[in-house]
């Protein structure tokens, strides 16, 4: 399958890496602390860091990301209020990253699935679904194939503009979990 | 249960009315064609019309809606492109309706459930969930109780500001169905 580098070593990084490794992808991790000193080997690079850390990652690794598929998993919440996103209204973190990486194929994915539902591949009795948005169909297809090989469903959610809606969905899901309306092992499942 | 007036007689109007009637609510319908001549008897009024028809409904019935709970179910898509909403970025149809009806308790609900999943009360093997956003907790509670009595789950999705995220979710779900990624009998289910 794919050759993947995951930048980040937290819960989401491990859950995503676990799914991809289960599917036969080669997965390497770069920790946040290696700040710029590591070599990005993968063709698919997952930015599995909190949104406030993205700018530093792009500053450190931006040149190495040219020509690669870059996967943004962030939910750019204002964590001081839990009541808004910090990106401009109507936009998305992913669109902003694409602007900063014009020579990369930037995708949104994994922001609407909690770590637990990736690791278990289930949300309730449903197979977990990773929603993928971006403008490069081949890049979306390659990521989807790598995810599905790991036992998790993947759906092309549309163009890069749909990253706005994926971030809204991720935000909503986070507020529901933080408000104890759902468990961190639950959330939205997609019925085909 | 509740005393409900549904303005609209289409597929969604009937699906919503069916759930509420099954739960023991009194449900009356006002057809779009009665343009302003009908009396709105219900304490909860569901605007089950397409978004472009809302302004006319508010012009005709706005005075009668004072003091009532008004439920906006719209997904304000630009149907010419299927690629954007027609409300200002960061806002929602519901917030705009609340501004026009300052003496009503305006809620967002039913825009993230297709008619088929309301009528069947199921999305896949999951109970269908109606997500409700609005600033009046009592109004949300009354609508949730009426919905749950009809065999459909209801979840308080937060303040009126969260109508933006519910509209993003409804929009995303419509694009997935229109793009044949999901069936009109499927969509997002919520696992608690």
Image (spheres, coloured by chain):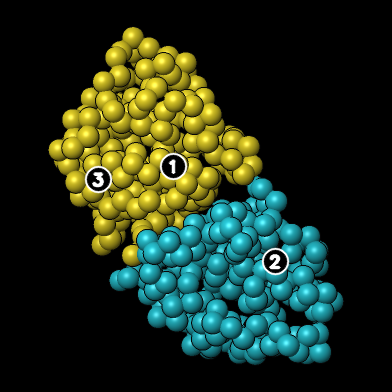
Chain colours: A yellow, B cyan
Within 10 Å of disc 3 (Cα), the crowding (few <14, some 14-19, many 20+) is: some
In the rendered view, does B177 fall on the left or right side of A149? right
> Marks 1 and 3, how far apart in space?
15 Å
The residue depicted at 65 percent of the width and 47 percent of the height is B90
Q: Which sits in the foreground, B14 or A103?
A: A103
Element under label 2?
strand
Residue that carries the numbered disc 1 in the rendered image: A134
- Give the quarter of the image for residue B83: bottom right
| Residue B129, visible in the rendered structure | yes
**Residue A10 vertical position relative to residue B65 in the rendered view, above or below:** above
| Residue A93, visible in the rendered structure | no
Q: Please tell me the numbered disc located at residue A117.
A: none
Residue that carries the numbered disc 3 in the rendered image: A145
Tell me residue B128's x, y (percent).
42, 71
The residue depicted at 71 percent of the width and 73 percent of the height is B53
Tell me residue A72's x, y (percent).
42, 34
Q: Please tell me the numbered disc located at residue B106.
A: 2
> Marks 2 and 3, how far apart in space?
43 Å
Q: Earlier in the sequence, mark 1 or mark 3?
A: 1
Within 10 Å of disc 2 (Cα), the crowding (few <14, some 14-19, many 20+) is: many
The residue depicted at 48 percent of the width and 69 percent of the height is B113
Viewer-nearest of discs 2 and 1? 1
The chain that hosts pointer 1 is: A
The chain that hosts pointer 3 is: A
The chain that hosts pointer 2 is: B
């Amino acid at each position: 399958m794919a050759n993947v580098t995951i930048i980040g070593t937290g819960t989401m990084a491990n859950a995503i890496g676990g799914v991809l490794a289960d599917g036969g992808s080669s997965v390497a991790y770069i920790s946040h602390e290696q700040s710029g000193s590591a070599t990005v080997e993968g063709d698919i690079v997952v930015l599995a860091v909190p949104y406030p850390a993205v700018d530093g990652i792009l500053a450190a690794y931006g040149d190495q990301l040219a020509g690669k598929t870059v996967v943004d998993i962030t939910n750019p919440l204002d964590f001081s209020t839990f009541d808004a996103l910090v990106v401009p209204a109507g936009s998305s973190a992913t669109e902003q990253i694409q602007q900063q990486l014009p020579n990369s194929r930037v995708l949104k994915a994994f922001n609407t699935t909690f770590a637990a539902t990736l690791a278990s591949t289930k949300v309730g009795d449903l197979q977990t679904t990773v929603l993928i948005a971006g403008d490069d169909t081949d890049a979306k297809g390659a990521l989807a194939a790598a995810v599905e090989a790991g036992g998790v469903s993947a759906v092309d959610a549309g163009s890069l503009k749909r990253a706005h809606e994926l971030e809204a969905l991720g935000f909503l899901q986070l507020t529901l979990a933080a408000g104890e309306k759902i468990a961190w092992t639950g959330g939205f499942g997609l019925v085909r």
